[in-house]
Each structure stands twice: as structure tokens, then as C-alpha cells.
Image (cartoon, rainbow, N blue to C red):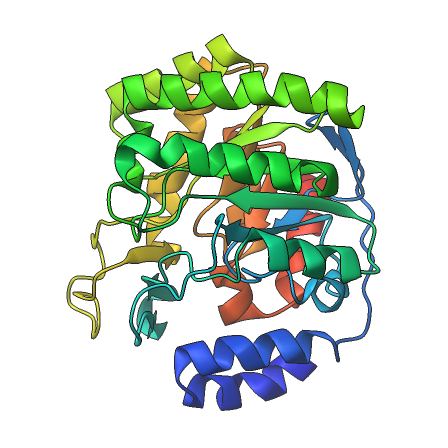
Amino acid sequence: MSLYGRARPLLFSLDPETAHRLGLRLAGLVPRATFRAPVKALGLEFPNPVGLAAGLDKDAAHIDALARLGFGFIEVGTVTPQAQPGNPKPRLFRLPQAQALINRFGFNNVGVDEFLVNVRRTRWRGILGINIGKNATTPAERAVEDYEHCLARVYAAASYITINISSPNTAGLRALQEKDSVENLLARLVSLRKKMIVQHGKHVPLVLKVAPDLDADGIRAIAEAVTRHGVDGVIATNTSTSREGVEHLPDAAQAGGLSGAPILKRSTTVLRELARLLPRTTLIGAGGILSGTDAQEKFAAGASLVQLYTGLIYRGPTLVAECVSAYRAK
């Protein structure tokens, strides 16, 4: 049995957020793994297409440990301009019968300045995505300023930057996905990136992370804005506010975003439609990957890369190898 297989009963006996913190520490004890299945995407050379989704390491404090698991890339954050505690606890719930989680963390993080101290302390030199967001106390009319602040601060340290407008756990955040709002946000961030390219002498790809709950009109508006402003990629998707398929389970009524197996089909539907509308844009499939077969489904739907989070909680590091193997077999 693997180290994670032995540790999982202990981890699942603990409060989920306590287990989350302990799991990050245990990652540093796992034998180092390396999986080769090179992929070119976002103008970058990925050693393999299987990455860690943002949210597991919000403060970029465990990058070296997580890199031991064999990921082709790691995304950290979401980070905001100022430190914030997030929502009150408890705010993370397991639905083991459905291989799912509900979280309402609310972008708890140490703030961008301390976050960057952690990034600079890291020895690993692989592909690092940095996921940026707004502070909960920032009014909607000034939200873009938070994204601009974070973009400018993290630019030099990032391999790519993810613009998170799809978490359901910061009030009003998902309104930024609406047509006029996303147009304004992307126009300003792409304009700022032009200045950053001159200042830092490098082009850092911008990626937009969207929700699985978008309707057809919402997906079309996102695709049009991505095309118009030259955004490099889209992550499909974040967590869901729907409880379809888990309504009968304990804690299903908890507020927050649902992740894991129940959102696989919904997330992949959004991915497939974005692939139809954005044939030349890099798409990253996330949401509901619990097996290599699930990863294959994302690749078949148009993803160049995939990301894991909840699947890692339920399956452990062997899921990384399984998904890389699925890519090789596609």
C-alpha cells in the first residue's frame, strides 16, 4: 500500500481543514516522482500535461513538497492584494459517498507581498501558475484594481497568471463573468500586461478561470472576450453552486463550491463548448477528475492540459501517474 493509502484513514478521521494542512506537510515525505509526456501549450514547454489546481497551496508555502508528486506544473493561490482570513470555519466539507468536497474558504491567504516571499524561497524551478483575485472588502466597482495590483506584483515570478473570476465564495465575484464586466476586466489586464512585457522583458500568458454553471450565452460571452483581447488560455472549470446528484447526502446543503466527481460532466460540457468556440486557445480541463479515464475525457473534449485537486484528496499521488498515462494513451 502507498504512503498515502496508509495515511488516508488518519487524514479522513480529522477535521477536513486540519487534514488539508497535514496533507501538505506529508507531501514532502513522498518519494520524488518524475513523469515525462512533454506538451507545448501557452507558449511553454510542459514536462507533462497534469497540473495541480489552485486552492490546495493558497500561500505558495508548499511548492517544493508538492513538486515531489510529479506534476507537470503547479498553480498556487488564489492570492489577493491584502491578507485576509477568509470565511468563518467550518468551511470545508467532505462528501465521501460522492467523492466530492464543498468549500467556502473565501480566498483566505497571506496577501501578495508575503506570498511572493514564499515563492522566492522555493527551490523548484518548474512551470508555476499564479492565481489572482480580489479582496472580499473591495467594492465591485474597484475590483479590477485588485487584479491589476496582483498582476503587476506577481508578473516577474509567474510562468502564467490565472484570473479567477469564478469562485462562488467571494460575494459578487462571479458577476465579473458577465459580458460587460469581463470585457472591461480583460481589456485593462491585457493593457497592463503590455507594460509588464516592456518592464520585465518577457511575455507571461494570461489564463481565465470560469465556472461550470455558465449557460450557453455566458460561455459565448466569455469566448468572445477571450478572443477579442488575446487572452492565452481558459481553465474550465472552477467549483459549482449546483447540488445536482448530491442533494441527499450529509452536508450537501452547506454553502460553497462543489468539486469532485459530481461536477465532471457539467465541467466537461463547458470545456467542450469552449473548445468549439476557441479552437486556437489553450484550454485547461479541471473539475471532477478522479481517474485516468476522467482525464482522457477532458483531453478528448479539447483540453491541452488538466488540473487536479479533489481527486488528489480521494486518490492520492498515484492519480498523477494515472492521468499522465492516460495522456500518453489518448
Asked which quadrant contains residue 192, the reply is: top right
Give the answer, above or below, for where 123 lies relative to 263: below
Could you tell me which residue is drawn at 73 percent across and 48 percent down? 72
Asked which quadrant contains residue 89, the reply is: bottom left
> Residue 157's x, y, as percent?
73, 43
Give the answer, above or below, for where 105 lies relative to 188: below
- Residue 174 falls left or right of residue 317: left
Farthest top residue in view:
228
The answer to whether one can see residue 53 in this image is: no
Depth check: give the residue in front, 292 or 142. 142
> Residue 279's x, y, as percent?
54, 15
**Number of marks:** 0
Quarter of the image for the C terminus: give it. top right
Quarter of the image for the N terminus: give it. bottom right
Give the answer, above or below, for where 185 lies relative to 322: above
The answer to whether one can see residue 275 in this image is: yes
Depth check: give the residue in front, 193 or 75. 193
Depth check: give the residue in front, 187 or 229. 187
> Residue 96's x, y, as percent?
36, 73
> Residue 21's x, y, as percent?
54, 77
Asked which quadrant contains residue 65, the reply is: bottom right
- Residue 35 falls left or right of residue 304: right
Could you tell me which residue is drawn at 44 percent across and 48 percent down? 287
- Residue 33 falls left or right of residue 19: right
